[in-house]
Image (cartoon, helix red, strand yellow):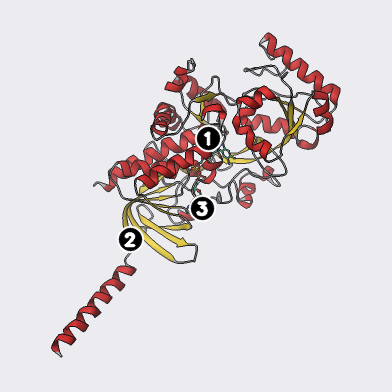
Amino acid sequence: MKKVLLAFLGVAAMGALCLFCLFLPERTDIVVVGGGAAGMSAAIEATERGCSVVLLEKMSYLGGNSLRATGGMNAACTEEQKKNGIVDSLDSYYQDTMKAGHWLNNKKLVRLLVRNSAESVSWLEHMGLDLSDVGRLAGHSISRTHRPAGGAPIGTSLIPVLTGQLNKRGIDVRTENRVIGLLHNQKGTEVFGVLTETREGRQYKIKASAVIIASGGFGSEPALYVKMDPDLKGFKTTNQPGATGDYLSIVEGLHPALVDMSYIQTHPTVEPNNGVLITEAVRGNGAVLVNRNGYRFTDELAFRDVLSREILKQPEKSAYLIFDDQIRKSLSATDTYFAMNLITKADTLSELAEMLGIHPVVLSQSVQRYNQLVMIGEDRDFGRNDLPSEIIHAPFYGIRIVPAVHYCMGGLKINEKAEVISESGGAIKRLFAAGEATGGIHAATRLGGNSLADAVTFGRIAAREAASLSRR
Ligand SMILES: Cc1cc2nc3c(=O)[nH]c(=O)nc-3n(C[C@H](O)[C@H](O)[C@H](O)COP(=O)(O)OP(=O)(O)OC[C@H]3O[C@@H](n4cnc5c(N)ncnc54)[C@H](O)[C@@H]3O)c2cc1C
């Protein structure tokens, strides 16, 4: 009888212990919020430094907007540039980034981005990403946008490579787990972990030595971007549905400083019916823009804000990208647009014009004039500073485009350690942020290719700093 009683008490004690454990918050060194390029890079880097990591992603798949990235990733003074005979400098990259941002950028963060850019590229290459093709996007004074060979889209190569590394390292990745808040002290000056909700609505806590917010921007939240910039009312977006600015509610109660929230970038060339972004690399590799009447009207490689404004001044607030078969072949990223039937194709420019509803004679004249400018090596009409090739190789292609919401330059204010800064000016302890959820690096407008450079570089910086805390 005594034995039975003892056994019963033992089982009851074990049960109580299990129940207790069930309600105890989990513990890990670092929680990463968001599974895009910034979050995945942070998780990999933190694991390399010996930390346990839980990566929480609210969608059912990893990748965020990073998965959609097409044109490439910027870096200066890389091995790939050297192999291609491109002579770049950190200063030139710095100047281009600052100029795009109207010199309102946080200079220290831009310097850090520029200095670390080549290392970010070689880090990814070392993990197996092909970044051997180097092209030039709008606003750059030299070719420094790295992408896979043949000009293939970068996002669909980058995310599988990063996912492979997460798997290889056995990192605890939880999709359909939305972070809804932070565990913090009463004053909101120090963070201890996160509160998360599963798809089924179960809420649970994870305690951590540090939290890295990498939850992206708010380009899929019209109520928010129209509030920040009323001119964007009615605009379509290029962003994935999960880009809803969750960091704003996650940090509630902490009073973080926000910067540049009203700077929202529109991408000038988006197909209006499907919202598919036509990568800047098409223009970078030689395409021209004409309006409904067939006239060229701008420097196609102007900054995105300038170009978007120019397009909105044209009839029907739209324009047409025109290119030839040589440009198509130089950029396999265009294959997707053809597969989606977005591009109109014709054997001659006049035929193409008729199919697109543009004046055929004017279009032919505009392209002829552009070809003359390519021959003399100077765009005397609009000052385009890179004229790669004449548009002469049939078949010819065209697509109607409009500007659409694309990238949020603003976000959480961070310092050079990627620590989140509070309204009162100090760093919030144990809280870091990286990628599109942060502001200050790009300011008024972002150079194409700079976002992935930012996400990977600052994701890794955040992880390094967070890892140093978890070892204490
Ligand atoms: C169509 C398109 C093309 C682009 N092309 C380029 C390019 O060629 N080069 C370039 O440099 N940039 C490009 N960009 C921009 C760039 O892709 C992104 O800005 C950048 O990748 C942002 O990385 P991120 O990791 O900060 O955010 P994201 O990649 O957006 O990742 C954030 C993740 O956090 C998740 N998340 C959000 N809230 C929560 C929450 N509460 N809990 C858990 N998870 C959450 C999101 O679902 C998402 O998966 C492009 C963007 C788009 C849309």
Secondary structure of the residue carrying tag 3 is: loop
Q: Which residue is mark 1?
A: 154
- Mark number, residue 26: 2
> As drawn, is 291 to the left or to the right of 460?
right
Is label 2 or label 1 in front?
A: 1
**Residue tagged 3:** 246
Q: Residue at x 65, y 47 (%)?
A: 226
Lateral position of residue 458 relative to residue 406, left or right: left
Amino acid on which disc 2 is placed: Glu
Is residue 53 placed above or below 297 in the rendered structure? Answer: below
Earlier in the chain: of badge 2 and badge 3, it is: 2
Label 1: state its secondary structure.
loop
Pick the residue in front: 441 or 14: 14
Quarter of the view holding residue 309 = top right
Residue 276 place in picture, x, y as percent: 65, 41
Quadrant of the rendered image containing residue 208? bottom left
Callout in the foreground (2, 3): 2
> Within 8 Å of ligand 1, the CB of disc 1?
yes
